[in-house]
Image: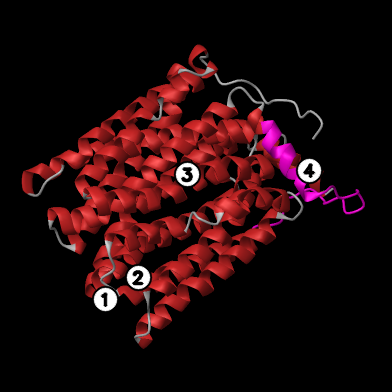
């Protein structure tokens, strides 16, 4: 009876209701709106800590270039071991519950850094340990996150929903570093880290307020061996003619991005010689490119088609070669090269992420996403160590020429893949033997 009454109400007020929903887009969906608020807050907190933690190493603990690069890499290292099994585990459990647990564990980890800083006992070893454990937690969160979004949205809403999530990420990359640099300089590093810890609390609260919208787990079904489930996800990805080149491209790009990011703060503070506060502001301004990319992605898809739009966005990665030319004063203008890179990364990621979510069958998406991310984040983990070695033995600027060259050339993989022949990315693939 309640459902019939609801239907009548919708029919009577259709013109106004449809207009409001059209204007709000996916934010008109209460569950997605709560999910988006929690994730956006968490992203801002992570943006703050992305600057605060390296600044702690550079300015407080006086760590060397290799240690700072390793600090960046530590968050990705767990993917080398746990990335593939995490996807299979995620497909066995409720995604919402798993994400809440991950948020609470992350809160505890980052709060421990703030407490240690206040007590004066913080060490580089603790920073590395927390970064690695937080990276382990993020493996499960990311796999569950990617599998949960299609449960909140229809397939034709994925581009819009992912655009909003990526816009939040881009906004966090704009505001987070600036906030982090200012907080670290004027209020101390402990305050910056505690902001990140608090953001995980907000994310957990929003997830708790989101009703569980997941299918019932079939506990009576015989559970297959973990290794077989991992192979299912790996086989699906490796045999898909479109997902495989996307995964290979993302891994190479991740290597270049991680390597460059690992050197960026050292480059600005020690090589160029600017303050930590100004460094945070510059990194925030560079992040505006991601916000711009999130805004234009849907428009580029509508005009050129999803496959062509993805390739157009990836062409912008060639701008990375401008970044190593950056110097103090007027020479800071060459940082615009990284601004263009962030435009290309975010706009292209929205398209590829929406495609992957739509193409993968629901019962295997956690494993496919984990396989995809394992390839990417394993490369990013190696990128931090790679950059540290290059920066130590060649110098920071020569190292940046190499790492930015990797970013600039990574999109060649897509231009030699079957995607180059398409206007639109293909429909969902069937699940065979999974």
Crowd band around label 4 with a 10 angstrom C-alpha radius: few (<14), some (14–19), many (20+): few
Q: Residue at x 64, y 58 (%)?
A: 210
Whether the magenta-drawn stretch holds residue 226 is answered as yes
In the image, residue 126 sits, relative to residue 40, either above or below, namely below
Specify which label sits upstream in the sequence, 2 or 1: 1
Distance in Å between CA atoms under marks 4 and 1:
51 Å
Q: Which percent across, then down, holds residue 354?
A: 56, 34
Label disc, if present, on residue 192 of the rendered structure: 2
Label disc, if present, on residue 379 of the rendered structure: 3
Crowd band around label 1 with a 10 angstrom C-alpha radius: few (<14), some (14–19), many (20+): few
Distance in Å between CA atoms under marks 2 and 4:
43 Å
Q: Is residue 9 left or right of residue 258?
A: right
Does the CB distance between marks 2 and 4 fall below 8 Å? Answer: no
Q: Kindly identify which residue carries mark 1.
A: 187
Q: Residue at x 39, y 71 (%)?
A: 193
Label disc, if present, on residue 13 of the rendered structure: none
Q: Which percent across, then down, holds residue 267?
A: 21, 53
Quadrant containing the C terminus is top right
The secondary element bearing badge 2 is classed as helix
Q: Kindly identify which residue carries mark 4.
A: 228
Report whether residue 20 is seen: no
Does the CB distance between marks 2 and 1 fall below 8 Å? Answer: yes
Q: Residue at x 50, y 63 (%)?
A: 132
Specify which label sits upstream in the sequence, 2 or 4: 2
Between residue 210 and residue 382, name the one nearer to us.
382
Distance in Å between CA atoms under marks 2 and 1:
8 Å
């Amino acid at each position: 009876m309640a459902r019939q009454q609801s239907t009548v109400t919708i029919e009577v007020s259709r013109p106004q209701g449809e207009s409001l929903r059209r204007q709000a887009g996916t934010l008109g969906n209460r569950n997605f709106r709560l999910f988006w608020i929690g994730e956006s807050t968490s992203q801002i907190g992570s943006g703050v800590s992305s600057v605060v933690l390296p600044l702690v190493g550079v300015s407080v603990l006086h760590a060397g270039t290799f240690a700072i690069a390793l600090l960046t890499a530590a968050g990705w290292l767990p993917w080398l071991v746990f990335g593939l099994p995490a996807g299979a585990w995620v497909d066995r459990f409720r995604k919402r519950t798993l994400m809440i647990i991950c948020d609470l564990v992350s809160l505890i980890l980052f709060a421990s850094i703030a407490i240690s800083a206040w007590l004066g006992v913080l060490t580089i070893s603790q920073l590395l340990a927390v970064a690695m454990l937080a990276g382990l937690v993020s493996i499960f969160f990311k796999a569950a996150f990617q599998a949960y979004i299609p449960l909140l949205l229809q397939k034709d809403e994925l581009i819009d929903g992912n655009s909003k999530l990526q816009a939040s990420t881009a906004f966090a990359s704009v505001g987070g570093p600036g906030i982090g640099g200012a907080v670290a300089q004027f209020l101390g590093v402990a305050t910056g880290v505690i902001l990140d810890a608090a953001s995980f609390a907000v994310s957990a609260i929003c997830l708790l307020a989101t009703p569980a919208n997941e299918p019932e787990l079939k506990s009576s079904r015989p559970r297959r061996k973990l290794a077989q489930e991992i192979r299912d996800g790996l086989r699906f990805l490796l045999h898909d003619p479109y997902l495989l080149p996307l995964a290979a491209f993302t891994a190479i790009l991740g290597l270049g991005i991680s390597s460059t990011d690992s050197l960026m703060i050292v480059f600005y503070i020690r090589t160029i010689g600017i303050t930590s506060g100004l460094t945070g502001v510059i990194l925030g301004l560079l992040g505006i490119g991601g916000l711009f990319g999130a805004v234009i992605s849907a428009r580029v898809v509508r005009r050129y088609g999803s496959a062509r739009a993805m390739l157009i966005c990836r062409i912008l990665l060639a701008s990375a070669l401008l970044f190593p030319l950056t110097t103090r004063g007027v020479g800071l203008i060459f940082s615009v090269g990284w601004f263009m890179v962030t435009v290309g990364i975010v706009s292209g990621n929205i398209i590829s992420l929406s495609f992957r979510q739509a193409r993968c069958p629901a019962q295997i998406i956690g494993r496919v996403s984990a396989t995809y991310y394992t390839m990417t984040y394993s490369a990013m983990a190696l990128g931090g160590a790679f950059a540290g070695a290059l920066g130590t033995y060649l110098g920071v600027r020569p190292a940046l020429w190499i790492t930015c060259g990797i970013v600039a050339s990574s999109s060649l993989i897509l231009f030699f893949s079957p995607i180059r022949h398409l206007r639109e990315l293909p429909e969902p693939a069937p699940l065979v033997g999974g």
